[in-house]
């Protein structure tokens, strides 16, 4: 009877550890996906030479999820450089609500000089 109680306690502890591992793995995968979405948004801004004024929000579907992307610009010492913060959150399409932030990227955007010949 004592051995059975010890076995049951050990089984419960192992089950909790396995559940925590599964949860942390799922959270890490979600954060990684959000990081890719944020980095893709930063790359698109650089490719399109987009200069952001104030804030901008949009929703995209990527990596098998719907994401809310919130961008915010701040001026820097140089008028040709701006600091952009990109916050990525999961968007619940069923409820139409934005969840808590999952990923965050900060980069510096600059105005490209057009070369004339």
Image (cartoon, rainbow, N blue to C red):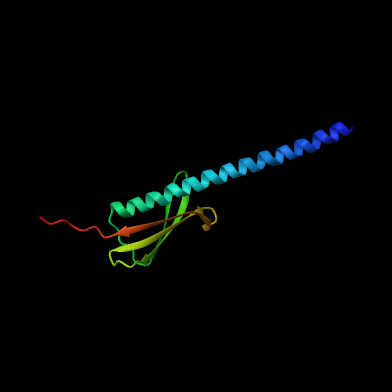
Looking at the rendering, which quadrant does residue 12 occupy?
Answer: top right
Asked whether, in this view, residue 101 is left or right of residue 78, the answer is right
In the rendered structure, the answer to whether residue 54 lies left or right of residue 113 reads right
Q: Quadrant of the N terminus?
A: top right
Provide residue 87's location: percent of width, then percent of height: 45, 57
Q: Is residue 84 above or below residue 11?
A: below
In this picture, residue 12 sits left or right of residue 83:
right
* Residue 31 placement (x, y as % from top left): 51, 48
Q: Nearer the viewer, residue 54 or 2?
A: 2
Q: Residue at x 30, y 66 (%)?
A: 78
For residue 22, which quarter of the picture?
top right
Residue at the image position 80 percent from the left and 38 percent from the top = 9
Residue 7 % position (x, y): 81, 33
Query: Does residue 47 appear left or right of residue 36 in this picture?
Result: left
Between 56 and 29, the residue placed more toward the observer is 29
Identified at 45% across, 44% down, the residue is 63
Q: Residue furthest right?
A: 1
Quarter that holds the C terminus: bottom left
Q: Give above or below for 20 relative to 104.
A: above
Whole-percent x and y of residue 73?
A: 38, 64
Q: Nearer the viewer, residue 20 or 80?
A: 80
* Residue that protrudes farthest toward the front in the picture: 77
């Amino acid at each position: 009877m004592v051995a059975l109680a010890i076995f049951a306690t050990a089984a419960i502890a192992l089950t909790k550890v396995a559940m925590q591992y599964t949860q942390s793995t799922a959270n890490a995968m979600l954060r990684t996906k959000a990081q890719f979405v944020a980095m893709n948004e930063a790359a698109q801004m650089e490719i399109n030479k987009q200069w952001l004024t104030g804030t901008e929000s949009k929703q995209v579907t990527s990596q098998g999820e719907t994401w809310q992307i919130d961008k915010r610009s701040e001026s820097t010492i140089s008028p040709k450089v701006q600091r952009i913060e990109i916050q990525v959150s999961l968007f619940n399409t069923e409820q139409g609500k934005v969840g808590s932030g999952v990923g965050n990227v900060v980069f510096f955007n600059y105005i490209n000089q057009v070369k004339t010949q």
